[in-house]
Image (spheres, rainbow, N blue to C red):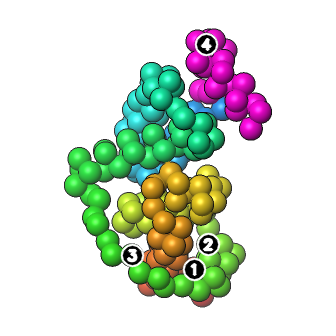
Amino acid sequence: MVADKLLIKNLKRGHEDAYRQVIEEYGNKLLRTCCLILRDREEAEDVVQETLIRVFQKLSTFKENSGLYTWIYTIALNLCRDRLRKKQELLVLEDEWVGSDDVESHVERNIDRELLKKELFEINPLYRETLVLFYFDDFSVKEISDMLNEKEGTIKSRLSRGRNILKEKLLKGGQLNGE
């Protein structure tokens, strides 16, 4: 947190090294997340570039209520959502609580990561976004709820529903190892 505050201070002062540090520290993470959400590397690269430009331009509006990392990811996610909306891929879904924690552990133990990514690309962007943030970027439910401006229960529901959708798709195709 102290390092974040120093970085923010240096960014606001216009120090070039601070800009470089943000790009080095967050650039690849943002790109991975955007690729997983958008399913298009070139578009993801554009979103990352646009995100960093907005971060640098809007730094004065950063209120420091959240961490710098969370704020940057929120900008990136909003830009990804805008792109998806423009493609008319985003569907509004009813939140429903379905769940069993053993689904998650079973899938984690028995699935190959490449297959998971392939199937992840096929599910609704609403669930894909939440699953990517939780499993690939290691954000907590609280952090995701702050980023997406949703209740924690909604995020838990999306995680559960997303896991179950993935499990069903994998079982249907006979793709789970040992099944």
Give the SS element for disc 1.
Answer: loop
Residue type highlighted by circle 2: Ile
Whether residue 158 is situated above or below residue 86 in the rendered picture: below
Determine the CA span between mark 1 and mark 3: 27 Å
Label 3: few (<14), some (14–19) or many (≥20) C-alpha neighbours in 10 Å: few
Where residue 2 appears, as percent x and y from the top left, is 77, 33
Separation (CA) of disc 2 from disc 4: 47 Å
Q: Do the residues labelled 1 and 3 touch (CB within 8 Å)?
A: no
Q: In this view, does 128 lie above or below 37?
A: below
Q: Which amino acid does label 3 sit on?
A: Asp
- Is 155 in front, or is 117? 155
Q: How crowded is mark 1: few (under 14 residues within 10 Å), some or many (20 or more)?
A: some
Q: Which mark is residue 95?
A: 3
Instruction: From the viewer's side, name the closer residue of 136 and 109.
Output: 136
**Residue type highlighted by circle 4:** Arg
Location of residue 66 by image quarter? top right
Q: What mark, if any, has residue 176 been given in the picture?
A: 1
Chain part drawn in magenta: 1-24
Vertical arrangement, residue 9 with respect to residue 42, above or below: above
| Viewport quadrant of the N terminus | top right
Q: Position of residue 12 (x, y in %)?
A: 58, 18
Residue bearing the label numbered 4: 13
Identity of the residue drawn at 57% across and 79% down: 176
Direction from residue 178 to residue 61 in the image, left or right: left
* Residue placed furthest toward the right: 2
Asked which quadrant contains residue 113, the reply is bottom right
Mark 2, residue position: 111
Tell me how far mark 2 sits from mark 1, CA to CA.
6 Å
Instruction: Tell me whether the residue at label 1 lies in contact with that at label 4, contact meaning CB atoms closer than 8 angstroms.
Output: no
